[in-house]
Amino acid sequence: MAKIVGGYATSHVPAIGVAIDQAKTEEPYWQPVFAGYEWSRKWIEEVKPDVVFVVYNDHATAFSLELIPTFALGCAAEYAPADEGWGARPVPTVHGHPELAWHIAQSVILDEFDITIVNDMEVDHGLTVPLSLAFGQPHAWPCAVIPLAVNVVQYPPPTGNRCLQFGKAIRKAIESFPHDMRVVVFGTGGMSHQLQAQRAGLINPEFDQRFLDLLVNDPDAAAAIPHVDYLRDAGSEGIELVMWLVMRGALGDDVKELHRHYHVPASNTAVGHLVLEPK
Amino acid sequence: MSGNDYHDIPGTFVFDAEQSRQGYHLNMFCMSLRQAKNREAFLADEAAYLDRYPMTAEQRQAVLSRDWNEMLRLGGNIYYTSKLAATDGITFQDLAAIMTGMDRDAYREMMLAGGRPIEGNRTKGDWDNG
Ligand SMILES: [Fe+2]
């Protein structure tokens, strides 16, 4: 049977992708950002997932205002990295796992999570930056990837509680797949940041650290944080953090925190990173 | 307390239903700039290119004058307007700096020093009193 062997949460700041692509990771500005990912590079190399399930959001790339799915599950065989206005990132094509993805789609829909199924989609920095942080710059990604795009651009995103419960349904789906397979679930986005208007640049380390603590030890309390608290205290784009709750739900009730990293800034954003193991 | 308690957050446009309805054509114009050939066509003749999108005169003027906060006020969303910034060769960090009214070095310094703190930036009242 398929098994969830870990959880990996990280910010997905586009400038981090640029720093990797342009070989700037050793520069003084970037070194402390990337230092916190060295441990988890080795960890994921040892864990050797067959599939990573990546919860991320599309930033007006594959989806525009024409179509705004709250949860969109990628069931395709492959996904091309997108041109987001600066040219596509020089990273490998992402290969999916249609068999497991379709299994998850059927399972969660019958569990009353009415998701959108996607068979053709480009993926933006929200998905590719976490892959680069986890796996570096290989010629091909070392495992299959199942993307789950969550709407966090059009207000309102799904509630924290809905994300946590959906994560639990994803766990049930993955662990009922009848083939031996190791899966790591990624939650991406955040942490505190605001990219827009006069309050841009907002960073709130107290909010972020409290969120990390709650996510690990009291996910129900993290899931109860109302949207207005994210918008106000973590910045208007900090609301991406609801996506970490999908990952947390997929790990089961109790987890062990293996690794934590927090750094300010990467461009406009506070960088947070967690590695969790189900107990 | 209504569901719109986020209207009390200073210096912030929450991209809710009202903003999205108002900004549809403005944002779809920005979305078109994701393609290189459209970026070229827009830069070659901005006014003619904008004729393809039935936005309001105010929105059109905000685009032509690159009034980034005004675009947001009129229903633009930052992930869309940033595509216009990319067309102009402006990075996300520099765009943020422009919207705050700071020069790019001062903004970069603020971020390096830990960013804009939450204290004093939580409510519109904080700003009025500051
Ligand atoms: Fe994002």
Image (cartoon, grey):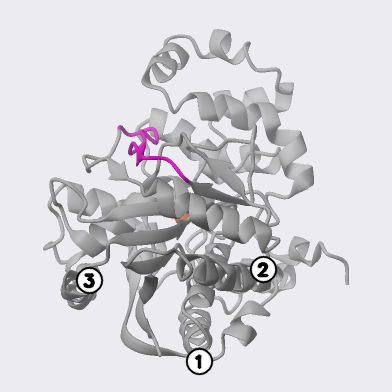
Q: Which residue type carries mark 1?
A: Asn
Labels 1 and 3: the sequence-earlier one: 3
Visible residue check, residue A121: yes
Contact (CB < 8 A) between labels 1 and 2?
Answer: no
Element carrying mark 3:
helix
* Residue A165, image x, y percentages: 63, 72
Mark drawn on residue A44: 3
Q: Label 3 crowding class (10 Å Cα cut-off): few <14, some 14-19, many 20+?
A: some
Q: Label 2 crowding class (10 Å Cα cut-off): few <14, some 14-19, many 20+?
A: some
Residue at the disc numbered 2: A162
Answer yes or no: disc 1 within 8 Å of ligand 1. no
Q: Residue at x 52, y 60 (%)?
A: A194
Q: Nearer the viewer, residue A236 or A277?
A: A277
The alpha-carbon separation of the residues under discs 3 and 2 comes to: 28 Å
Check the residue under mark 1 and report the chain it is in.
A
Q: Which segment did they paint magenta? A: A75-87
Residue at the disc numbered 1: A217
